[in-house]
């Protein structure tokens, strides 16, 4: 695992279908985790989904393939500021994407601060709050991330449709209430 892996582009329908199924299963797990009070679990899986979708957009804009080590915050910075300008000067120019990427970057800072402080007490003045009470705070962290992921996905899906392409999240991996119903024969067991 020491070597950086490059994110692959779906080169055939089977690869795209596997990616969409993985997204769907991951998002469904997120929602189950939130419902059952496992907010940090939800945040971790959402972070993976969000970084993958940001990586896809970054690759489209910057023409530089992202690696498995790119973080959500790092992808936001690259998309907005064009790090490595000598290799890829391109930055996100679509104002809708810029706005949501800025929100994601801001969210990532708040998430990092909250997660890294979950089990810590920093001073004697800290309120006497139990661990489970602190975890409940992460519910809003997870729900904010769901909202940002869905905003990014809607923009991405619309921008791809304009050029006759399909998003890797098709059909509505991050919107369970919009998903079409599939039969068991087609292998989408979670939708019947």
Image (tube, rainbow, N blue to C red):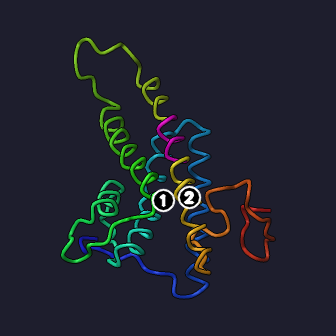
The span shown in magenta is 139-146
Q: Quadrant of residue 21?
A: bottom right
Q: Quadrant of residue 159?
A: bottom right
Q: Residue furthest left?
A: 86
Name the quarter where the N terminus is drawn: bottom left
Q: Please give the label number shown on residue 109.
A: none
- The x, y position of residue 71, in whole percent, is 33, 58
Discs 2/1, front: 1
Q: Looking at the image, which residue is at 50% across and 39% down?
A: 39
- Dot 2 or dot 1: first in sequence order is 2
Could you tell me which secondary element the residue under label 1 belongs to?
Answer: helix
Residue nearest the viewer, comparing 42 with 180: 180
- The x, y position of residue 10, in whole percent, is 51, 82
- The x, y position of residue 95, in whole percent, is 45, 58
Residue named by callout 1: 49
Q: Are marks 2 and 1 in contact (CB under 8 Å)?
A: yes
Residue nearest the viewer, comparing 18 with 155: 155
- The x, y position of residue 38, in whole percent, is 52, 39
Q: Please determine whether, in this image, residue 117 is positioned above or below residue 145.
A: above
Q: Please determine whether, in this image, residue 55 is positioned above or below residue 124.
A: below
Q: Please give the label number shown on residue 26.
A: 2
Residue nearest the viewer, comparing 18 with 65: 65
Q: Residues within 10 Å of mark 2 (few under 14, many from 20)?
A: some
């Amino acid at each position: 695992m020491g070597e950086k892996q490059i994110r692959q582009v779906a080169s055939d329908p089977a690869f795209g279908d596997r990616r969409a199924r993985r997204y769907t299963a991951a998002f469904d797990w997120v929602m189950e985790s939130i419902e059952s009070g496992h907010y940090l679990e939800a945040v971790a899986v959402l972070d993976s989904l969000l970084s993958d979708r940001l990586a896809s957009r970054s690759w489209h804009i910057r023409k530089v393939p992202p690696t498995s080590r790119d973080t959500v915050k790092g992808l936001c910075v690259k998309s907005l500021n064009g790090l490595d300008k000598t290799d890829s000067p391109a930055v996100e120019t679509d104002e809708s994407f810029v706005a949501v990427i800025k929100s994601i970057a801001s969210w990532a800072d708040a998430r990092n601060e909250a997660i890294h402080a979950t089990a810590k007490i920093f001073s004697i003045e800290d309120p006497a709050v139990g661990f489970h009470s602190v975890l409940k705070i992460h519910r809003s962290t997870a729900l904010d991330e769901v909202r940002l992921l869905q905003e990014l996905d809607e923009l991405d899906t619309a921008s791809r449709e304009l050029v006759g392409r399909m998003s890797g999240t098709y059909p509505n991996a991050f919107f369970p209430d919009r998903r079409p119903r599939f039969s068991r024969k087609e292998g989408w067991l979670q939708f019947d």
